[in-house]
Amino acid sequence: MRYRRGLVIAIGFALIAAACSSGADDTTTTTPATMPPVSSTVATSTTTAATTTSSTTTTTSPYGGATLLTQVIQMELTVLGYFDGVADGILGPATEEAITAFQTDAGITADGAYGPETYAALADTLEADEDFVTSVQEDLLELKLYPGPVDGDYGSGTVKAVEALQEKCEMNVDGRFEPKTHVCLEQEMGRV
């Protein structure tokens, strides 16, 4: 099971990387300089003299631009059995349906949008998934943030390693493996 989840994540990021470098005339893609915005929709970025950051955008989607955060949420929902599409980073109808189904099962507001309530519920569910936690521990071990053991238990050692990761990414340090922390991990592992 751990192999399949790692493979799903690796394939998802490989597909996004391939799409970003395909050179298609109808797609404009830029690499995020900062964490993607937290919202259920993503606006296409514009460049001004005062702006030095950009966000990932794809002009071919009627649903807005692709974001790394949405892609990570799609992968997490795939691991949990809610999403079976391609983790393309676009918040479209299939992703909204998967989010709504997850929210319903988690007993939170079921609106198909993601935000703090959904992030916390995803963290709760994933932190309880032994195979997922094992995969995270292996990544943290590789980054030399976690001394072990790799046992699938989201205990105090894993929490401390996640806090170290969050500090490294200059984000809120709370030890929770929410989607934004997952984005940070994928960036630190060089998968995006």
Image (spheres, helix red, strand yellow):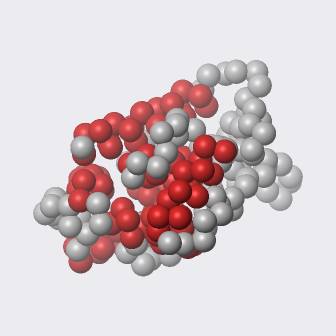
Residue closest to the eye, 160 or 154: 154
- Quadrant containing the N terminus is top left
Q: Residue at x 29, y 60 (%)?
A: 129
Q: Is residue 190 visible?
A: no
Q: Which residue is at the front of the view, 186 or 121?
A: 121
Q: Is residue 15 above or below residue 5?
A: above
- Is residue 125 something one can see in this rendering? yes
| Residue 21 coordinates in the image, percent (x, y) | 60, 26
Who's the residue at 42% across and 33% down the image? 11
Q: Is residue 158 above or below residue 188?
A: below
Task: Name the quadrant containing residue 128.
Answer: bottom left
User: Toward which corner of the image does residue 63 lie, by quadrant?
Assistant: top right
- Judged left or right of residue 21, residue 135 is left
Q: Is residue 180 left or right of residue 126?
A: right
- Asked whether, in this view, residue 74 is left or right of residue 29, the answer is left
Residue 52 position, x and y percent, is 74, 54
Q: How many marks?
A: 0
Residue 35 percent across, percent down from the top left:
59, 58
Residue ID at (59%, 28%):
19
Q: Is residue 121 left or right of residue 8?
A: right
Q: Nearer the viewer, residue 149 or 52?
A: 149
Residue at x 20%, y 67% (from the top left corner): 153
Q: Position of residue 188 (x, y in %)?
A: 41, 52
Q: For residue 24, what is the image quadrant?
A: top right
